């Protein structure tokens, strides 16, 4: 039976597909760590109170990259190059979602609008990450090889999402509500298309590695398209709503370490 659980079990069981999966994940997390580190360094003076939280966010992302590389090392594998069509963060940047890397490489302070764009982009992408971790924890939270890593990352993603909600609501109360909602909508509609394209690309690579028959690949492609159709029809709205989280100041302290990795 074709299911998320059986699919992931198949990927984890094969060294080549596992190597690609962990490499893609590690690369994306490391990129997120760099982006947050640069944003923290360039936050405008009027918003310096956000810098420690952005730094914490970046430290968590760096840690996740180390966790995925640690999973590879435990199996005696090395990271492999990430195919460009599977590079979620790069494709988001190319679509103009979030802050351009050229801007982040300059030593020029960001504007308040830039920070609104960053938080809105993070709200959308962290929703995607949190949703994925909920699914993985449900099926693989007790997996002997990847379970501990998945649970650790899942806790962090919940904190990141809570932080985005709280900070965006605070900025909305300060008069930025319309800008935030417009930016959230633009980010969400672009993200769902990129996620669809990346999902197709990743599954195509996995299919070649694992030798999937055409019928299986076609069924997976249809499932990916069905998810996109649902999100395009209205499912994207879960990515733009803002509610005060139960856990306040979720990124108010130092990042937790992951010594096992």
Image (cartoon, rainbow, N blue to C red):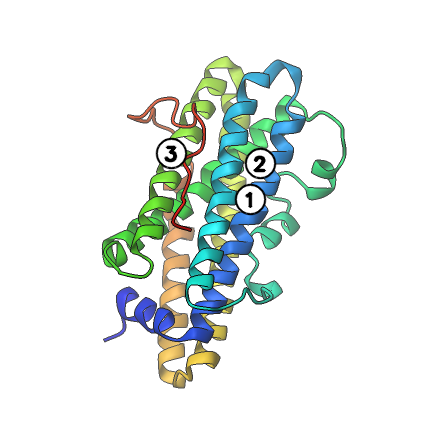
Residue at disc 2, secondary structure = helix
Q: Position of residue 10 (x, y in %)?
A: 33, 73
Q: Please tell me which of labels 2 and 3 falls first in the chain.
A: 2
The foreground one among 7 and 72 is 72
Against 236, residue 38 (above or below) is above
Q: Which residue is mark 3?
A: 159
The foreground one among 169 and 247 is 247
Q: Residues within 10 Å of mark 1 (few under 14, many from 20)?
A: many
Residue depicted at 42% across the width and 63% down the height: 74
Against 173, residue 13 (above or below) is below
Tell me how far mark 1 sits from mark 2, CA to CA.
Answer: 6 Å
Q: Position of residue 7 (x, y in %)?
A: 32, 70
Q: Position of residue 52 (x, y in %)?
A: 53, 24
Q: Which residue is mark 2?
A: 36
Residue at disc 3, secondary structure = helix
Q: Residues within 10 Å of mark 3 (few under 14, many from 20)?
A: many
Q: Which residue is mark 1?
A: 32
Residue depicted at 33% across the width and 40% down the height: 155
Q: Position of residue 135 (x, y in %)?
A: 29, 54
Disc 1 vs disc 2: Cβ atoms closer than 8 Å? yes
């Amino acid at each position: 039976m074709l299911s998320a659980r059986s699919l992931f079990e198949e990927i984890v069981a094969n060294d080549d597909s596992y190597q690609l999966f962990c490499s893609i994940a590690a690369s994306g997390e490391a990129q997120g760590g760099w982006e947050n580190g640069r944003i923290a360094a360039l936050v405008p003076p009027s918003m310096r109170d956000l810098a420690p939280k952005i730094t914490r966010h970046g430290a968590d992302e760096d840690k996740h990259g180390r966790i995925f590389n640690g999973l590879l090392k435990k199996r005696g594998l090395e990271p492999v190059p990430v195919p460009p069509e599977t590079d979620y963060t790069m494709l988001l940047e190319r679509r103009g979602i979030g802050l351009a890397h050229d801007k982040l490489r300059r030593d020029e302070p960001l504007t308040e609008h830039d920070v609104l764009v960053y938080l809105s982009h993070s709200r959308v992408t962290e929703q995607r990450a949190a949703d994925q971790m909920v699914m993985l924890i449900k099926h693989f939270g007790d997996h002997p090889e990847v379970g501990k890593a998945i649970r650790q990352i899942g806790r962090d993603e919940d904190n990141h999402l809570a932080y985005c909600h709280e900070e965006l609501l605070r900025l909305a109360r300060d008069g930025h509500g319309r800008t935030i909602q417009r930016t959230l909508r633009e980010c969400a509609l672009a993200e769902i298309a990129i996620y669809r394209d990346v999902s197709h690309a990743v599954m195509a690579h996995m299919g070649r590695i694992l030798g999937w028959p055409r019928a299986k690949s076609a069924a997976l492609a249809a499932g990916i398209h069905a998810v996109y159709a649902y999100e395009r029809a209205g499912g994207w709205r879960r990515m733009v709503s803002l509610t005060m989280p139960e856990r306040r100041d979720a990124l108010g302290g130092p990042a937790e370490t992951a010594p096992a990795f």
